[in-house]
Amino acid sequence: MAEIPHLTVVIPAYDELENLNLLLPEINSTLKRNKKVASYDIIVVLPPFSTVEELTEIAGLGATPIKRAPTESFGDAVRSGILGTSSKSQYTIFMDADGSHRPSSLDKLCDADPTAHVIVASRYVRGGQSENSFILRMMSRTLNVAYSLILGIRCRDVSTSFKRYQSDDLRNLTLKGNDFDVVEELLFRVRSLHGNDFKLLEIPDVFHERIKGKSKRRLGPFIVSYLISLYRLSREESRSPK
């Protein structure tokens, strides 16, 4: 018997058509087989300058293409994806378009505790793994420890975007981040919505190397945006009632 009336998968994408041609058929196949999911939709959030041909190609792969607005930033991709989510959606799962998050892991996110506000497909719990280089893994772990300790979020993998949220929670958020730090802000603001009642669960997952193409992250601006975001959110945390 289906337990999820409607699920939405949101995939921010920037020049990832090669990977989406591989991923979208597998995502559709996985969700169609999952007996807990009664219905679903897949939203691919493309840059503002995407062509009609690109939009048509995405639609032909079984997803709904939308253009992020007003800018091409990752933050606007996340906000546009949330705005595009159907009012009937119970859960929203965010995942990357480069193949680092594999469609086979969607079953774990769908089958996890239905009462949790956030389910994290985590690299850093027992059984989790990352295929990134040693330096990138150490940078990631340092970042995650900093966000967890400073913001008081009991989560080992704050920075992964591969998470399941309650869709109603996302509709009640105001997100300010413009870069990849919006992922941490999203978790911070959902936690703030629920206070002491916040329930988060981490399940082990493998973060894979991208399938094709090159990463869009530039290391310098990437680090700066995270530090600025951590400072901004820590100020909010220090002012919030305990």
Image (tube, helix red, strand yellow):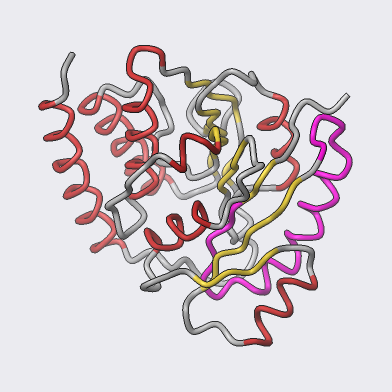
Q: Is residue 124 magenta?
A: no
Give the residues drawn in magenta, as a range.
10-38
Q: Position of residue 31 (x, y in %)?
A: 80, 44
Judged from this view, the residue extending furthest toward the front is 87
Viewer-closest of 197 and 94: 197
Vertical comparison of 128 with 102: above or below: above
Which residue is at a point 72% across and 26% down the rendered structure image?
A: 111
Q: Please tell me in which quadrant of the rendered image residue 127 appears.
A: top right
Viewer-closest of 165 and 203: 165
Left/right of residue 56 with respect to residue 72 in the rendered view: right
Which residue is at a point 60% across and 42% down the rendered structure image?
A: 93
Q: Please tell me in which quadrant of the rendered image residue 197 appears.
A: top left
Which residue is at a point 53% across and 61% down the rendered structure image?
A: 12
Vertical comparison of 91 with 197: above or below: below
Viewer-closest of 51 and 95: 51
Q: Position of residue 196 (x, y in %)?
A: 34, 12
* Count of all numbered marks drawn on residues in the image: 0
Q: Please tell me in which quadrant of the rendered image residue 66 appears.
A: bottom right
Left/right of residue 58 with respect to residue 87 in the rendered view: right
Q: Quadrant of the C terminus?
A: top left
Q: Quadrant of the N terminus?
A: top right
